[in-house]
Image: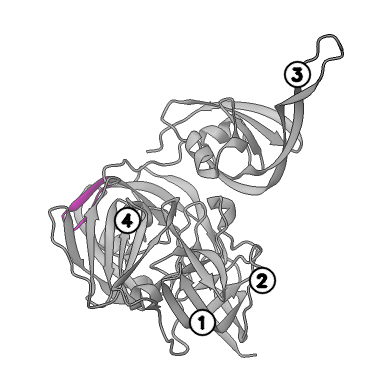
Amino acid sequence: MQLFVLNIDKKLILPVLLVFFSFFYLSAQSGFRLISDKDYHTVKFRLISNLIVLPVEINGVELSFILDTGVNRPILFDLTSADSLKLENTETIYIRGLGEGEAIKAYRTRGNVMKVRGGVVNENEDLYLILDQYINFAPRLGIPIHGIIGFELFRDFVVEINYSRKRIRFYRPGTYKHKKCRRCETLPLDIIHNKPYLKADVDLNGRKGVEVKLLIDSGSSDALWIFEKENEGLITPKKHFEDFLGRGLSGSIYGDRARVEKLKIGKFELPETKVAFPDSISIQHLQNLNERDGSLGAEVLRRFNVTFDYHGKKITLRKNRYFKEAFKYNMSGIELQHNGIRVVKELESGIRRGQSGNSGNEGVSIRLDRLLKYTLHPAFEIAEIRQGSPAFLAGLRTGDVILSVNGKSTYRYSLPEVTEMLNVKEGKKIRLEVDRKDKVLKFSFELKKML
């Protein structure tokens, strides 16, 4: 067994879910290719918390992967629902990520067959497996997520992402023709250490047009991250609030949340864009820190239909129906996750039929019964709660399981739907019924707009 020690830019930002790895090449890869003779292959994806979730098959087992422009190698980190997956030729590595903790153990496995919904294949893929139970997207997204894939797909194809139609197309390089349109703009793309970067401008602290170089990170559900650099005018605005930004491989990540007055990408302008400033301790192990000023996440990217052309070193943005949506912060202070299951007791109607007891008047008697039905549903647990938020001041705490929101039983809804109920509009009164250590408690508060 061979041992490697790798420093990895890895953040599992939950709930923000900012994700990026930095692996260097250890061996040559055969690469991805189209199975058919067509010039492109189309795949439908799910868009959850701004993240693209693709159906990916590994060694014959279908799994779900996040498409992440910031990841260098395919990563597996949750195989609880894929016990039949066989991985061979493994060796141990150690990974250090963001946060204050120690490096964690991972495994590299070679020679795997990887397919993206039947049309794109790599028959000799290296994968990295992390067995740490904390590296798991499923509780915060509400669906099983088994891994992350990124650079190799963008390296081997021109990738066209249509966020509006939730469709992605992989084109053979050289066959894709860039289109000109009024709503589009093609910008230069820098590829550094296998990651895409572009330049943008921000209006910040009264200064207009401050140039920033940003990693494009489709694996982050947040909008914008900026690293504080006082000599460049990149300073946290006075109007901000402290927050838990997520959990990295090596521990929790904290920082400040604020807004930039304007984010400008080419000719496109996005006013009042959300921004996070991670603290220095959280990013102390971040590689190539001097090569960029922050990251551009999927909450901005989904406002465009995007074409990545790594070969031509350019990116094309076309604004879509999400472009004018306002950037909203969490107004309740609650971040939810799935944590186990709970038993729900329901009443349902049942019909019993029988013959009438009067022999002189034969007929059928019908009786309606109320029957009890017990079903299992995911438990929506408060994973994080912001200090000083409306929910916190009302008395809610981490670990509380939300049973109902404004009289609506949560088991009838998905995790994103319940999250939306908790962030409807400013001033909305929220009434919650929660289970706290087998006691049912009631709370109420009003949603408060942040910043």
Q: CA distance from mark 2 to mark 1?
A: 18 Å
Quadrant the C terminus occupies: top left
In the image, which is nearer the foreground, mark 2 or mark 3?
3
Give whichever of discs 1 and 3 has the lower sequence position: 1
Q: Is residue 293 magenta?
A: no
Q: Is 58 above or below relative to 426?
A: below
In the image, which is nearer the foreground, mark 1 or mark 4?
1
Q: CA distance from mark 2 to mark 4?
A: 35 Å
Give the image quarter of residue 70: bottom left
Q: Amino acid at mark 3?
A: Ile
Q: Is residue 265 magenta?
A: yes
* Residue at the spot 32% in from the left edge and 40% down from the top edge: 326
Secondary structure found at label 4: helix
Query: Which residue is denoted by mark 1 in the rendering?
Result: 126
Query: Which residue is denoted by mark 4 in the rendering?
Result: 301
Query: Which residue is denoted by mark 3 in the rendering?
Result: 366
Q: In the depicted view, which residue is nearer to us: 76 or 254?
A: 76
In the image, which is nearer the foreground, mark 2 or mark 1?
2
**Image location of residue 18, percent across then percent down:** 45, 59
Q: CA distance from mark 1 to mark 4?
A: 28 Å
In the image as oriented, which residue stretches furthest toward the front?
Answer: 360
Give whichever of discs 2 and 4 has the lower sequence position: 2
Q: CA distance from mark 2 to mark 3?
A: 50 Å
Query: Which residue is denoted by mark 2 in the rendering?
Result: 84
**Image location of residue 408, percent across then percent down:** 58, 28
Q: Amino acid at mark 4?
A: Leu
* Residue at the spot 33% in from the left edge and 46% down from the top edge: 259
Residue 228 visible in the shown view? no
Give the image quarter of residue 187: bottom left
**Local crowd size for mark 4, using a 10 Å CA cut-off: few (<14), some (14–19), many (≥20):** many
Q: CA distance from mark 3 to mark 4?
A: 59 Å
